[in-house]
């Protein structure tokens, strides 16, 4: 893979740090590497948004996770969490849907849950994580329709915190069933630069990962 191809992948990468033991120094390092490698954004927990936004000073966008990683918080809590994150300097929100409500086939709730966060971060990018590893084929297709109707900007395959991240089959399914105005983000499961390139070639617009810079550096990638 040549330099131009690697840079094109980095430009689509949400450089992610969501580990529970990450320190302030770890987040500063994340931000500095994000600037050095010109990634799409840094993705961090709400409690670290202000730190990253202040350090980056607009050089790289900050994405905050909401309802993460399980998604079963009340919609009002997710909406407030999104508002706070935006106030602190985030320009993108990654929200997790309530998978239990999907299993109940309570799709009206799922739609309104997303819309509540959409209203809270109107004017900013909203990514909806559907955690595909837990879904049946029918549920995956249904959620493509729900996210398409919700006003969200992206549908995202995974939190990266479960036993499986993005798969090529799932990305192909999403690209086939989501409406054209909704973009696709993969997360987890990106173990090589070739994986990343294949996801992009299949139609993924963004790549959620903490491995991408290590892979570009020729080091072994591990983690998200």
Image: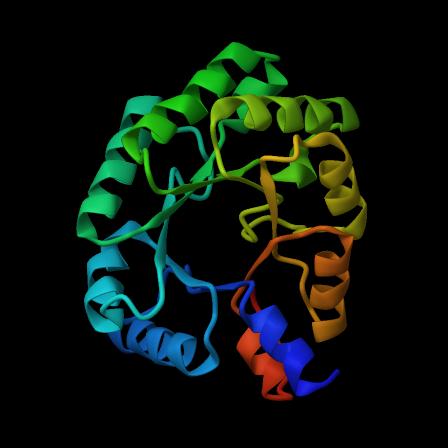
Say whether residue 12 is left or right of residue 65: right
| Residue 74 visible here | no
User: What quarter of the picture does the N terminus occupy?
Assistant: bottom right
Looking at the image, residue 99 lies above or below residue 50: above
From this view, report whether residue 35 is shown above or below residue 217: above
Q: Nearer the viewer, residue 117 or 153?
A: 153
Colouring mode (rainbow / by chain / secondary structure / one colour): rainbow
Q: Is residue 148 above or below residue 93?
A: above
Q: Residue at x 59, y 43 (%)?
A: 183
Horizontal side, residue 115 vs residue 185: left or right: left
Residue 107: percent from left, percent from top: 56, 14
Vertical arrangement, residue 95 with respect to residue 151, above or below:
below
Residue 120 visible in rendering? yes
Q: How many marks?
A: 0
Residue 180: x and y in percent read: 65, 35
**Residue located at (53% from left, 68% from top):** 11
Quadrant in which residue 51 is drawn: bottom left
- Asked whether, in this view, residue 175 is left or right of residue 36, the answer is right
Position of the C terminus, as image quadrant, is: bottom right
Which percent across, then down, holds residue 157? Answer: 62, 44
Q: Which residue shows up at 69% across the image and 69% down it?
A: 191
Q: Which residue is drawn at 34% across and 80% down?
A: 32
The answer to which image quadrant residue 20 occupies is: bottom left
Q: Position of residue 160 (x, y in %)?
A: 56, 53
The quarter of the picture where residue 219 lies is bottom right
């Amino acid at each position: 893979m040549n330099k131009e191809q690697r840079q094109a992948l980095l430009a689509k990468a949400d450089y992610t740090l969501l580990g529970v033991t990450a320190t302030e120094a770890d987040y500063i390092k994340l931000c500095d590497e994000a600037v050095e490698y010109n990634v799409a954004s840094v993705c961090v927990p709400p409690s670290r948004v202000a730190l990253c936004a202040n350090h980056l000073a607009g050089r790289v966008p900050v994405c905050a996770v909401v309802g993460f990683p399980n998604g079963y918080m009340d919609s009002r809590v997710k909406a407030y969490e999104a508002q706070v994150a935006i106030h602190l300097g985030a320009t993108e929100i990654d929200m997790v849907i309530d998978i239990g409500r999907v299993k109940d086939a309570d799709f009206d709730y799922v739609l309104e849950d997303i819309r509540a966060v959409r209203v809270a971060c109107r004017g900013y990018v909203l990514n909806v994580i559907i955690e595909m590893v837990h879904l049946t084929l029918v549920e995956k297709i249904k959620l493509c329709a729900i996210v398409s109707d919700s006003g969200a900007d992206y549908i995202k395959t995974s939190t990266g915190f479960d036993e499986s991240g993005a798969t090529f089959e799932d990305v192909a399914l999403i690209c086939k069933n989501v409406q054209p105005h909704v973009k696709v983000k993969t997360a987890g499961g990106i173990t090589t630069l070739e994986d990343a390139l294949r996801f992009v070639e299949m139609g993924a617009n963004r790549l959620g990962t903490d491995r991408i810079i290590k892979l570009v550096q020729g080091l072994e990638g591990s983690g998200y």
